[in-house]
Image (tube, rainbow, N blue to C red):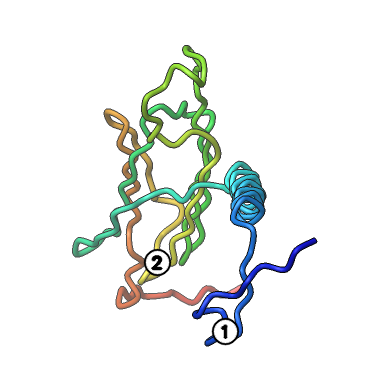
């Protein structure tokens, strides 16, 4: 095996010449591993629901786009200071994967937990869906409200 003559740059820096075909093959193999790991992670990952949260004088309102989600596939849990919305959007699979030019819509499970800025009255909360928009109306607890308590004798 004949020894190749080092270039001026190799002599100057002390670097070693590599076979480009081996280097390219190694890079392609590493990219394939990373892509496989990335797609596996994405399949297991749950999507995060986007929301708008605002308040009026007596209500906290949460809005979220849930188009394509059946009401029975939606789970909304509320406490006095926390709201969790979970659901699943099913893909109809009308076309083969190879027939798509673009795939930007999210299909699969999603969730979102929102910490509320004030406590709410859980019993009077309501949820409505209108044209794919989920609207939660959460009445605020009136902590300043006072009432008179009568003492009974037994």
Q: Residue 74, how many percent across, how many down? A: 51, 36
Q: Quadrant of residue 17?
A: bottom right
Q: Residue 141, how many percent across, how many down? A: 36, 67
Q: Which numbered tag is attached to residue 11?
A: 1
Q: Which numbered tag is attached to residue 78?
A: none
Q: Residue 5, how many percent across, how many down? A: 62, 72
Q: Quadrant of residue 15?
A: bottom right
Residue designated by label 2: 116
Q: Residue 55, how many percent across, how many down? A: 24, 62
Secondary structure under badge 1? Answer: helix
Front residue (pair 45, 54)? 45
**What residue is at 33 percent from the left and 33 percent from the top?**
129
Does 117 sit above or below residue 128?
Answer: below
Q: Quadrant of residue 54?
A: bottom left
**What residue is at 49 percent from the left and 77 percent from the top?**
151
Front residue (pair 135, 80)? 135
Secondary structure under badge 2? Answer: loop
**What residue is at 50 percent from the left and 53 percent from the top?**
84
Position of residue 89 in the picture relative to residue 19 (left or right)? left
Position of residue 79 in the picture relative to residue 18 (left or right)? left
Q: Residues within 10 Å of mark 2 (few under 14, many from 20)?
A: some
* Quarter containing the N terminus: bottom right
* Quarter containing the C terminus: bottom right
CA distance for labels 1 and 2: 66 Å
Does 142 sit above or below residue 83?
Answer: below
Position of residue 37 in the picture relative to residue 99 (left or right)? right
Front residue (pair 84, 32)? 32
Q: In the displayed image of the protein, which residue is found farthest to the left?
A: 57
Position of residue 54 in the picture relative to residue 115 (left or right)? left
């Amino acid at each position: 095996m004949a020894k190749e003559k080092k270039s001026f740059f190799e002599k100057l820096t002390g670097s070693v010449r590599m076979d480009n075909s081996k280097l390219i093959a190694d890079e392609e193999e590493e990219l394939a591993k990373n892509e496989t790991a990335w797609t596996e992670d994405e399949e297991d990952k749950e999507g995060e629901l986007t929301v708008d949260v605002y308040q009026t004088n007596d209500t906290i309102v949460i809005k979220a786009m849930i188009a394509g989600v059946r009401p029975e596939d939606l789970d909304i849990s509320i406490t006095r200071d926390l709201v969790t919305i979970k659901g699943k959007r099913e893909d109809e699979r009308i076309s083969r994967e190879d027939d798509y030019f673009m795939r930007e819509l999210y299909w699969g499970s999603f969730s979102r937990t929102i910490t509320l800025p004030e406590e709410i009255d859980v019993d009077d909360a309501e949820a409505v869906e209108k044209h794919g928009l989920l609207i939660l109306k959460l009445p605020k607890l009136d902590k300043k409200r006072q009432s008179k308590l009568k003492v009974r004798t037994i």
